[in-house]
Image (tube, rainbow, N blue to C red):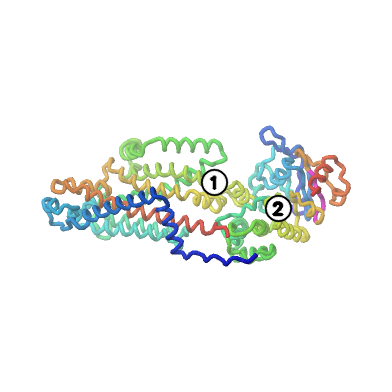
Amino acid sequence: MDLTAPAIAIRDLNKFYGTFHALCGLSLTVRKGERVVVCGPSGSGKSTMIRCINQLEEHDSGEIRVFGTLLDDNLASIDAVRREVGMVFQHFNLFPHMTVLENCTLAPILVRKTPRAVAEALALKFLEKVRILDQASKFPGQLSGGQQQRVAIARALCMQPEILLFDEPTSALDPEMIAEVLDVMVTLANEGMTMICVTHEMGFARKVADRVIFMDKGEIVEEAAPAAFFEAPRNERTRLFLSEVLAH
Amino acid sequence: MTALPAAPALTPPARRFRRLRRDYFGSPASALMTLASLGILLGLGWWLMNWALLDATFSAAATQAECVQAGGACWSVIAARWRVILFGIYPYDEQWRPSFACAVVAGIILLSCLPRMWSFRRLALTWGLGAAGFYILMRGGILGLSVVNEQQWGGLPLTLFIFVATAVAGMPLAILLALMRRSELPVVARVTGWIIDTIRSLPLLSILFTFAIVVPFMLPGFLIGEKLYRVICGAALFFAAYQAEIIRGGFQGIPRGQDEAAKALGLPYWQRMSRVLLPQAFRLALPATINQFVVAFMETSLVVVVGFIDLLAAGNTAYKTGEWKFAYVEVYAFVAAIYFLFVFGLSRYGAYLEARMNAGHRKE
């Protein structure tokens, strides 16, 4: 882990599902502290791309480096990268048999070897940050979707990662709960967390993104700062997509 | 529009009464069925009470003629032969030892059921001490106790020992087989699948025979060991093959995102399994697992075919001496009551565990 290297450097990434070409020679560099929003129609490879970064999906060819560490067949480097890259999922994926607090302290205690008392203090700090401290002793099944997703963010933060990946974090939420999750994400963005966020929340992209990336058919079609991206999209496919998501 | 006065809610007894009336007397046909069923149940109950209690003979000194004359159950056979049923051919003067041994087994089982005992160190300590206590009591050879070979063990302590040892050895093996069956390495997964399917396609009887009689010819002398432990190995293997598939079924009910979330947090394989996936798999597989325990408990009675006098076999020997030959129903009823006690307790404990596990998952 070399914190002076680019946070993420992807070069010529290819990924197949059977014969389906999910990622077609994709390249992307993300600087430390940069906030990148990835959007695009479903099936465009957005999720596949960010899931390759912590190797929930194995890529077929190309190169992924996270802070200089190359992701290859060396399991130790995959473990090292996963320790520094947190992930928030569409369906939260909290562990249902553990309390909120236990969800947050499990990995720090087991992976980082943090003493229990320290891990719990840290977890309470982050639970307070996502404004859910009063639910610490409840089980995930007792919380609303928005609350669960905020716990999931706190759980990822407890590993004190350098990078956070968000995979459609608000897509499974009822409309009235989206704002509470986005608020937390904006707070994190303003604190300088390196973030890659797959989302259709264009308001969020406008507000916090340094760069917006539009993907279609496994390729990056267009990338630009939010102002340019929304006001003057260059590519026809981008324009079509934006007219559809911004229509309502 | 004026508001109607709110209808008062039914009191719980009134609601129950209405429920009862609707469920059991809702139509003439169902009323008839209810009354007929009640009549049959009462008749059976009355007959059973007469047979088992009112007309029964209890004295150990009673003879067959006295029993027949009384007309009811002849519990005299139990009074006279209960030590044979419970302890088989264990030396008569030493039978206080298997009594204590049974108490030790029952004690460690009950202790292990308490949630506050569920830490590895406490369980290991309890079971280690319990197993040592059981073995010393049963086999003797130290502390001034005379040696009683495994071949002379019998009755309830033997049944309990075979069951507990099968489960204790079989469960870790089952977990291992289930994990190997799910391995990402195709060779490991496939070979494990074959092993499991092979064991499941063999009758337990043939496995017990093989381990009791055939295996000694294939092993070097120092590995053969006591027949009882070989038979337990066979039973554990059989138990593990079935339980492995039950656990695998539990795994399949877990959403894929659970493993992904654990991976994303950097948890290595064994911690993902032990902390995240196995607890959820066991929760999903609990009803089938309790079922498997019940079956395993019943199947201990098969060891009679390789020469062990378990509880059921001891019951058989207890009445097959001439004088009590007529009283087999009473002996079987007594043995059945003992099995019932354990299996019913197991089932209730399973229900308690399910309720306890569901408590944390309740939606508000």
Of helix, strand and loop, which one carries label 2? loop
Give the residue displayed 68% in from the left and 32% down from the top. Answer: A19
Q: Identity of the amino acid at label 1? A: Gly
Residue B147 seen in this snapshot: no
Give left or right: position of B221 versus B58.
right
Closer to us: A25 or A136: A136
Residue A20 seen in this snapshot: yes
Q: CA distance from mark 1 to mark 2?
A: 25 Å
Above or below, B134 against B216 in this view is: below
Viewport quadrant of the C terminus of chain B: bottom right
Cβ atoms at labels 1 and 2 below 8 Å apart: no
In the image, residue B24 lies at what x, y percent?
A: 40, 53
Quadrant for residue A98, please give it: bottom right
Q: Identity of the amino acid at label 2? A: Thr
Residue at numbered disc 2:
A170
In the image, residue B297 lies at what x, y percent?
A: 35, 48
Above or below, A238 against B147 in this view is: above
In the image, residue A137 lies at what x, y percent?
A: 58, 64
**Magenta stretch contains residue A211:** yes
In the picture, the disc for residue B253 is: 1
Viewport quadrant of the N terminus of chain B: bottom right
**Magenta stretch contains residue B293:** no
Estimate how packed mark 2 is, as few (under 14), some (14 to 19) or many (20 or more) residues with alpha carbons within 10 Å.
many
Span highlighted in magenta in the image: A208-214
**Chain label for disc 1:** B
Give left or right: position of A234 versus B64.
right
Quadrant for residue B252, please give it: top right
